Amino acid sequence: PRPARAAATSVVDMMAMLGGSKTVNSSEDFRGGQALAVMGGCEIDLRKATLGEDAVLDIFAFWGGVVVQVPEEWDVDNRVNAVLGGIEDKTHGVLGNNPRLVLTGTVIMGGAEVKH
């Protein structure tokens, strides 16, 4: 396994199938992206990134999991659907005037977690 390197791209596009994938994003204009985990796991660390406007991150997990770490000053709007699985939002949970990350997608017999 290779350690995750910080990427400065404005989008995240990752996939893990029967394995794992990890990324650290340090973009100054993060816009979102997508993560797909099938019997594997994706870890996305956005704690070094900044949002210009609202960003949308679409996740899909089937017998796998996705973990998203966000800075404490971000608001998270969780719109993920779970079927025989779960999504756990460990952020503050209060939407205000802070930059906002919108999570969309589906988790099937797997899990997703968003935390600070």
Image (tube, rainbow, N blue to C red):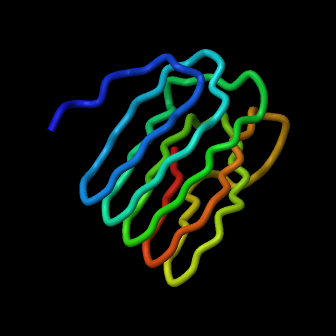
What residue sits 56% from the left and 44% below the top? 34
Residue 8 higher or lower than 72, as above or below: above
Residue 29 point in image, percent of width and height: 65, 19
53 on left or right of 62: right
As drawn, which residue projects farthest toward the right?
97
**Residue toward you, 114 or 17:** 17
59 up-or-down from 75: above or below:
below
In this rendering, would 65 be left or right of 58?
left
Residue drawn at (62%, 23%), measured in percent from left and top?
50
Q: Pick the quarter of the image with the N terminus.
A: top left
| Residue at point 56%, 34% (across, down) | 71
Q: Please report the residue visible at 40 percent of the width from the left and 61 percent of the height from the top.
A: 65
> Would you say 56 lies left or right of 44 here?
right
Residue 97 location, x and y as percent?
84, 35
Task: Give 11 or 6, whichever is nearer the viewer.
Answer: 11
Q: Position of residue 94 (x, y in %)?
A: 76, 52
View extreme (left): residue: 1
Residue 44, by quadrant, is top left
What is the count of numbered marks? 0
In this picture, is 46 found above or below 95? above
On the picture, is 35 further left or further right than 16?
A: right
